[in-house]
Amino acid sequence: MVTQVAGQLLGRLLRLALVTAVIAIAALIAIYHFTVAGTLALELQYGLINARLIVGGIYAAVVVVALIVLWSMRRKPVEPPAPALALPRETQFAMLVEACMAGYALGRKTDRVS
């Protein structure tokens, strides 16, 4: 039974990896063909060297935008919160207030005789 479950999970992962690989290869082929078509179209207007520079600049801009997005999405380090009673004076004051409240609560009469 365990081997069947493992086989099903492995089969699903293998199919998912295969579909992902096919999609990635198709995307790379599409990018290649769009690049060639864009270069040919630009070559007619600007010449070969300028067309390749324009296409390279477009790819460089895409990389810069991707890096900016990744940089902005990074996890920022979380600073530990400052302790509430960091200073001894604050600690003494908090203890005094707590003692006063405890004394008040203990000193109150809860049973009233009428």
Image: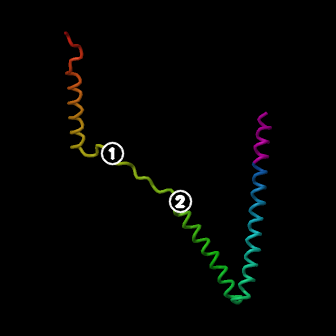
Categorize mark 2 by other alpha carbons within 10 Å: few (<14), some (14-19), many (20+).
Answer: few
Name the residue at the top extreme: 114
Q: Quick one: SS at disc 1?
A: loop
Q: CA distance from mark 2 to mark 1?
A: 29 Å
Categorize mark 1 by other alpha carbons within 10 Å: few (<14), some (14-19), many (20+).
Answer: few
**Residue at mark 2:** 73
Give x and y (percent) for residue 19.
Answer: 78, 56
Relative to 7, residue 100 above or below:
above
The front one of 87 and 94 is 94
Name the residue at the bottom extreme: 47
Residue 26 on the magenta segment = no
**Residue at mark 1:** 83
Q: Amino acid at mark 1?
A: Pro
The boundaries of the magenta stretch are: 1-12
Screen quadrant of the N terminus: top right
Name the residue at the front extreme: 114
Relative to 104, residue 91 above or below:
below
Q: Residue at x 73, y 71 (%)?
A: 31
Q: Quick one: SS at disc 2?
A: loop
Q: In this image, 97 relative to 47: left or right?
A: left
